[in-house]
Image (cartoon, helix red, strand yellow):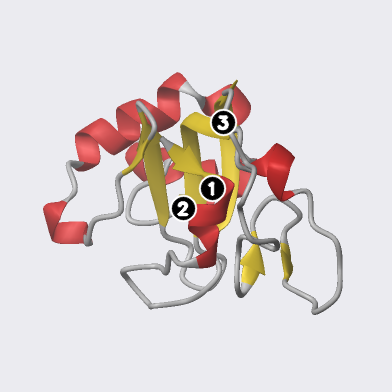
Amino acid sequence: MMRYWGLDVLKCVNCKSFPLELHPIEQEKQEIDTSGIEKPFCKVYCGYLKEYIQPGKEYPCDECIRIGIKTGVLYCPNCKHWYPIKNGIAVILVDNKRKLNKDLEFLKTYRDRIPEYILKEGQPVNLESASK
């Protein structure tokens, strides 16, 4: 299951930019024993709060770790590439390994829950380019 803490390590496969934006569509709260987890759990970037880790700051790791993202979008603001999260798995592939027709179907299915800038300008495919 995709987790917010994944943003601490994931980079865009197209331009290697970090961090990616996470836009959850479906989330699931899970019972997970967080005792013994070193905090902050993330070392560089807290995807839950959308900020770089600051030494000495308290982070809501106990809450964050329990949230699984079932469906969503990862987005690179640098090169505008987006990657779907399906069934809890982030599908982060280079363009020539992607099934653009499936990506387009994903955008159409969740268009009311995906930011407009991804729908219109996202790469490698978007609803604007598909309508031309």
Please tell me which residue is depicted at 53% across the width and 27% down the height of the picture: 111
- Neighbours of disc 1 within 10 Å: few (<14), some (14-19), many (20+): many
Which residue type carries mark 2?
Answer: Gly
Type of amino acid at the residue the image marks with label 1: Ile
Residue indicated by mark 3: 32
Q: Secondary structure at mark 3?
A: loop
Gap between marks 1 and 3 measured at Cα: 32 Å
Image quadrant where residue 116 sits: top right
Task: Assign a secondary structure to mark 2.
Answer: loop
Q: Which residue is mark 2?
A: 122
For the residues marked 2 and 1, what is the alpha-carbon distance in whole angstroms? 4 Å
Left or right position of 71 against 106: right
Gap in Å between the C-alphas at discs 3 and 2? 34 Å
Q: Is residue 35 left or right of residue 119?
A: right
Q: Is 124 placed left or right of 36 in the picture?
A: left
Per the image, the residue denoted by label 1 is 118
Give percent across and percent down for residue 128: 45, 43
Q: Residue at x 51, y 43 (%)?
A: 3
Under circle 1, the secondary element is: helix
Tell me what residue is drawn at x 60 percent, y 33 percent: 67
Mark in the foreground, 1 or 3: 3
Check if mark 3's residue and mark 2's residue have beta carbons within 8 Å. Answer: no
Q: What crowding class fits label 2: few (fewer than 14 Cα within 10 Å), some (14-19), or many (20 or more)?
A: many
| Image quarter of residue 5 | bottom right
Query: Is disc 2 in contact with disc 1, using a CB cutoff of under 8 Å?
Result: yes
Q: Point out the image quarter for the C terminus.
A: top left
Vertical position of residue 109 compared to residue 7: above or below:
above
Q: Type of residue at label 3?
A: Ile
